[in-house]
Image: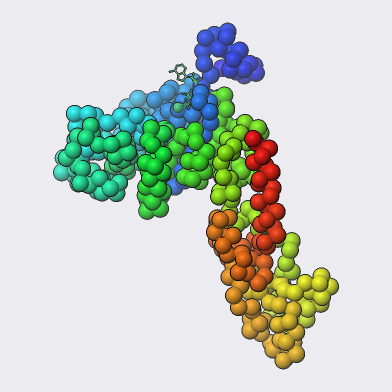
Amino acid sequence: MEMLRAGQTKDQILAQTGMVVGVRDANFTVNEGEIFVLMGLSGSGKSTLIRLLNRLVEPTHGQVLLGGQDVAAMSKKALIALRRKDLAMVFQSFALLPHLSVLQNTAFGLEVAGVDRKARERRAMEVLDQVGLRAFAQQMPAALSGGMQQRVGLARALAVDPSLMLMDEAFSALDPLKRTEMQELLLQLQKEQQRTIVFVSHDLDEAFHIGNRIAIMEGGRIVQIGTPAEILRNPSDAYVRAFFKGVDVKKYLLAQDVARSDETLLIHATADARADMAQAVAQLRERGQNHAFVMGEHGRWQGAVSLDGLLRGLESGSTSLQNWYLEGVAPVSASLSLNALMGRIVQQPVPLPVLDAQQRYLGAVTQTVLLQKMVDMDQQESRNE
Ligand SMILES: Nc1ncnc2c1ncn2[C@@H]1O[C@H](COP(=O)(O)OP(=O)(O)OP(=O)(O)O)[C@@H](O)[C@H]1O
Ligand SMILES: [Mg+2]
């Protein structure tokens, strides 16, 4: 620890002491209900870090706070109790007990925790059902394919209803098809029950697909933490960028990543609709633009109007802006994928408004903006190659 504090590198410390710095200065928060992915090259410290969380590796220094309790400091007894009911782990190697049936394997954690047979088998059947293995409950693990065995591994972890689930390369031993299938299963379960999961992966596609946020590790350190889009938009260095190589990064961008707020005139509706209309007409003429977006209270989206509509509104003595909203302008959600966005944008008469979850206007996307973004991304991709 002193050598680390004195600024010595992992290599220097190894050379002088024969000791490996597994993880250093790792500082991060995992939010309740999210899938937090640890990603990095082999040997970067992912397994060490995830095992520090349940103390399969004893931390030399630091804290692991789970619901306010410091796992790193608790007694062995408290730790065992915590592992039984609150912390479950899914291993790359499945780690099933070969002499126990699928049902018994699934119920194993509950058995260790002292749950009576009837109750634990009922719960085990419930989770086997969730992972699609109800019919295999009485089989032995050896009779199952790798993908099915890992479903049992997942079911065993789910059975104890843990507040934190740790998954170390849980799908890496599976062939690509089975792997994608397991990712979908995990995401589907996540929709239903919102677990807190720390998931280790060395695969960017997997990390981006299932991760709400990702921490990228290098040489025992966390070099970047962010959502997939944040990391894509702003990779902290060449090490992080190198992960993007050969990956279709466009599919991970969302509408919020391309929305711009400087394109379209915004009208903040007041109680005086006629004044709003007159002011909008003047501003549109000044800018040489044909339409504007109307915002209500707290910046909430109201609708789109055209210069033509505003003029007709003024002429006809109308006192409602609302009557002149353009039809067919359907805002999209900030979390819409870029691929889905492309399908929507061609039909749009005006820039496509992008709204956040509170219906607030974030910005608009035009075909030009979208094309420009694609070109930027392609250039970034060729820089990586
Ligand atoms: N039991 C151990 N004893 C000594 N050093 C270890 C041990 N386990 C891991 N290490 C070292 O700790 C560092 C981090 O290893 P770790 O297994 O955490 O990496 P990883 O990111 O999980 O790699 P992989 O993708 O290959 O699983 C490496 O330098 C490794 O050599
Ligand atoms: Mg590992």
Could you say which quadrant of the image residue 349 lies in? bottom right
Q: Position of residue 366 (x, y in %)?
A: 68, 62
Can you see residue 331? Answer: yes
Could you say which quadrant of the image residue 13 lies in? top right
Q: Is residue 189 above or below residue 383?
A: below
Query: Where the N terminus falls, by quadrant?
Result: top right
How has the structure been colored for display? rainbow
257 to the left or right of 113: right
Q: Residue at x 75, y 74 (%)?
A: 290
Q: Residue at x 48, y 41 (%)?
A: 206
Q: Residue at x 40, y 53 (%)?
A: 191
Q: Nearer the viewer, residue 151 or 320?
A: 151
Q: Nearer the viewer, residue 318 or 180?
A: 180
Q: Residue furthest right?
A: 286
Q: Position of residue 16 (x, y in %)?
A: 58, 8
Q: Residue furthest bottom?
A: 316
Q: Position of residue 9 (x, y in %)?
A: 62, 17
382 to the left or right of 114: right
Q: Position of residue 175 (x, y in %)?
A: 38, 37
Could you say which quadrant of the image residue 91 lies in? top left
Can you see residue 296? Answer: no
Q: Residue at x 65, y 36 (%)?
A: 384
68 to the left or right of 373: left
How many callouts does the rendering have?
0
Q: Nearer the viewer, residue 130 or 269?
A: 130
Query: Where the C terminus falls, by quadrant?
Result: top right
